[in-house]
Image: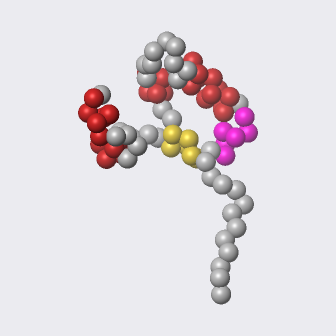
Amino acid sequence: MNSVIIYDMKKVGLIYDDIFLAHETPQWHPECKERLIAIMDALKSSAIWDKLIHIKPRKAEFKDIEAVHLHDYIERL
């Protein structure tokens, strides 16, 4: 007999901390403090906010970074 699991709703996690606002990018880059503030304000004022799973970030280990970036790229940084 096969079991079928039906989920009523998918869960979405949001990893955020105000320390993210200190991330500096070139002036022309779309990833900026103001953009992040606007996104967070929009989420907080919507019904979505209470449905999110709020996750505090942790310091990434080297293996975490290597999982998404080439070793040579990391070494250049």
Residue sitting nearer the eye, 66 or 22:
66
Task: Check the picture and name the quadrant holding the C terminus.
Answer: top left
The N terminus, quarter of image? bottom right
- Residue 66 lies, with reference to residue 31, above or below; the image says below
Q: Residue 69: where, in percent of width, then height?
A: 37, 40
Residue found at x 34% / y 40%: 70
Extreme bottom residue here?
A: 1
Q: Give 61 or 31, whichever is nearer the viewer.
A: 31
| Res. 28 in view | yes
Tell me the residue at 47%/40% (across/down): 56
| Residue sitting at x 52%, y 14% | 28
Q: Residue furthest top?
A: 27
Residue 46: x and y, percent? 72, 34
Residue 14 image-quadrant placement: top right
Q: In this view, does 49 lie above or below 34?
A: below
Q: What stretch is highlighted in magenta?
A: 46-51
Residue 10 position, x and y percent, is 66, 54
